[in-house]
Image (cartoon, grey):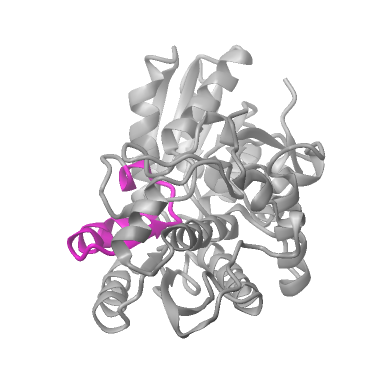
Amino acid sequence: MKNYCMLAAGLALGAATSLFPFSTQAADPKPVKIGAIFSVTGPASFLGSPEAKTVKMLVDKINAEGGINGRKLELVLKDSSGSPEKAVSFAKQLIEEEKVLAIIGPSTSGETMQIKALCEENKMILVSCAAAEVIVNPVAKYVFKTPQKDSQAVTWIFRTMKEKGIRKIAVLSSNDGFGNAGKKQLEEMAKPEGIEILVNEVYDKQATDLTDLLTKVKSAAGVQAVVNWSVVPAQSIVAKNMKQLGLNVPLFQSHGFGNRKYVEQAGVAAEGILFPAGRLLVVDDLPATHPQKTLLATYKKDYESMYKEDVSTFGGHAYDALLMVTEGLRKAGSAESEKVRDAIENLKGLVGTAGIYNLSAKDHTGLELDAFEMLTVKDGKFTIYKK
């Protein structure tokens, strides 16, 4: 593990009752506005709903404890319904009318890429909750993201495959920003990792039956495993269709599989699915000494107690996004945008739900390979994959 600095203790939620560090200096009557664009409704609500709930919960907690540097936070939340057009419109409102310090979100890679240039042009801090690596590669001065990188997820998948003696695979991906970005990484990294892609198919992101594509996979000689890179509904559909066809090879999913609802939707077909993810889903399996243990356990308990639903990695992405902004604000000592941006870019040892963040001018995600664990589904539950 890396050197987690003092933040590992200061931000571990159980070190005190505080979720975030704050100052007790005299409060400024003017709150700091934080914008958020999430897909609270619509087809990507499985992402945006837990993100919005998480941020609301944490902002209330921070304000109840005195705010950041004595100033309360004001959350200005917009529901894009997963629409890139709405995301652009809301981003303009947050920048021009609301004059927020920073924007958290959007929920999807496609939406994020639509507002990335807008935020950069307006020198607006953007901390995306979407996963596609193109969001931060190449680096844009004002754009950050919290989920682990696609390339890191692919590395975990390919290395696990090689450990299992798998060399020839089929790749399925959705025709959206997340699917396209993952497909690109899988294709570029396969040969260097000693993996051969025998079948490579793209499907509509709203597809409800993928039997035709999986029939092609089954008829292709030599396929030893399937990689599916998408978000719902396809994540459960691929698993069910494979079982129906008797396609008995391992199924690997992207790091977008981190929600127990997907397992419930796939039913018995989910058994044995392998996917890289952060440790929030398996927090109970972590040793007490793990640097993320207290933070993850407290977030899980607080979220599930308040909302009566399972915590997901997606809500965790929003947790980390707000954490980056508030810690940048605290370190900057003011709400001056450039100072906060600079502080975020230099955060080191920041304990979040996805891992330990060490950001720099060259890395606006700040997570390394060890932010992931390889997980599997066993008896309908997530567990750490044992070789």
Say which of 229 and 208 sits in front.
Answer: 229
Residue drawn at x 75%, y 60% is 16
The x and y percentages for residue 219 are: 49, 25
Residue drawn at x 53%, y 81% is 27
Question: Could one spot residue 77 in this view of the protein?
Answer: no
Residue 5 higher or lower than 387, as above or below: below
**Where does the magenta region start and end?**
109-136
Question: Could one spot residue 367 in this view of the protein?
Answer: yes
The C terminus lies in quadrant: top right
- Quadrant of res 311: bottom right
Is 159 included in the stretch rendered in magenta? no
Is 115 included in the stretch rendered in magenta? yes
- Residue, far bottom: 29
- Total marks drawn? 0
The x and y percentages for residue 55 are: 56, 69
Say which of 160 and 3 sits in front.
Answer: 3
**For residue 242, side relative to residue 96 (left or right):** right
The x and y percentages for residue 196 are: 42, 16
**For residue 382, side relative to residue 192 (left or right):** right
Residue drawn at x 67%, y 35% is 375
Say which of 199 and 28 sits in front.
Answer: 28
The N terminus lies in quadrant: top right
Residue 79 higher or lower than 177, as above or below: below
**For residue 382, side relative to residue 336 (left or right):** right
The x and y percentages for residue 159 are: 55, 19
Residue drawn at x 64%, y 56% is 312
Residue 10 higher or lower than 197, as above or below: below
- Residue, far front: 25
- Residue, far left: 121
- Quadrant of res 336: bottom left
